[in-house]
Image (cartoon, rainbow, N blue to C red):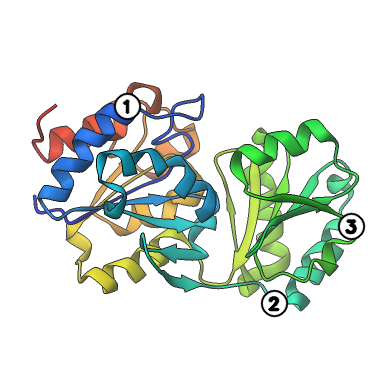
Amino acid sequence: MTIKMIASDMDGTFLSGDETYNQERFSKVLAQLKANDVRFVAASGRQVENLKALFAPMAEYGLADQIDFVGSNGSVVTTPTQELYAVYLSPDLIRKVIDWNALNPKSSDNVIILAGLNGTYISNHVGPEFKQMLEIFYPKVIQVEKLLETGDQILGVSFVWPHEEVQEHVEQIESVFGDEVHVTGSGFGTVDILPKGVDKAAALEVLQDYYDIADHEVMVFGDNTNDLEMLAKYENSYLMPNAMPLMHDAHKQLALKTNVEDGVLATIESELQLEE
């Protein structure tokens, strides 16, 4: 097996439940990947700024230059030093989505999140506890009076519903907007509305073109519906054992262990025959 790029989702996949990962073990794996000219990609619904903060400790090992980032479920792609790709929702489409939400009887208690270039925007009616929770996943959470007047470029609109209702709302929004947008569920209970054609697989193609890497040289890991496109695209793709039943119906090749057992790292070590 010749692998030149490894991409992993974060929540429910690479990260354990307490927002951490095994830094010592990852540094050993990453050093071996670097020696073999293999890139590591953090591919997440989180924004790039948040992802860079998660992996900032790798700078202490001299390995920060080995990590690339796919943020906002594929809306932004960066190397350690430059942005390669970014795509935004048009103001008209954002207004259309928010207007639809206002008329949706099942939306009375949900929270709208606008992921922007310069910040993350929520209504000033959102309580402090929920804002604090969002700050785990989103950088620069800013409360505003009018969501349609942020003055920022918006990468995606997210709605927060109970986790068990996410797929229901994904299907509902798809039925309303068709192929105007891409709709997906994320690992922390959100429904994300993204620009048309945006997903993690499409974003990884940008990095493949940049580094001249073929599909069969890519390995990916995921656990949720926002990972479906990349799990389906690449032959070396692994679903986490802890994924929901819906995902097990869609994808059969599993990582060796769950996210809380360092399943991504264990599988990389095994498949690439690295030293543990």
Cα–Cα span, label 1 and label 3: 41 Å
Q: Amino acid at mark 3?
A: Ala
Cα–Cα span, label 2 and label 1: 39 Å
The relative height of residue 43 versus residue 207 in the rendered view (above or below) is above
Image coordinates of residue 12 in percent, x first then y, are 46, 33
Look at the numbered discs 2 and 1 and tell me whether their residues touch, using CB distance below 8 Å: no
Q: Residues within 10 Å of mark 2 (few under 14, many from 20)?
A: some
* Quarter of the rendering containing residue 77: bottom left
Q: Residues within 10 Å of mark 1 (few under 14, many from 20)?
A: many
Say which element carries label 3. helix
Q: Amino acid at mark 1?
A: Asp
Q: Residue at x 20, y 34 (%)?
A: 28
Residue hosting label 2: 90
Image coordinates of residue 164 in percent, x first then y, are 65, 34
The answer to whether residue 7 is left or right of residue 184 is left
Q: Residue at x 49, y 32 (%)?
A: 244
Q: Is residue 162 visible?
A: no
Name the quadrant of the C terminus.
top left
Say which element carries label 1. loop
Depth order, front residue of 183/266: 266
Residue hosting label 1: 262
Q: Residue at x 67, y 45 (%)?
A: 168
Q: Is residue 110 visible?
A: yes
Image coordinates of residue 200 in percent, x first then y, are 43, 59
Image coordinates of residue 184 in percent, x first then y, are 58, 54
The relative height of residue 10 versus residue 275 in the rendered view (above or below) is below
Q: Earlier in the sequence, mark 2 or mark 3?
A: 2
Q: Earlier in the sequence, mark 1 or mark 3?
A: 3
The answer to whether residue 9 is left or right of residue 254 is right
Say which element carries label 2. loop
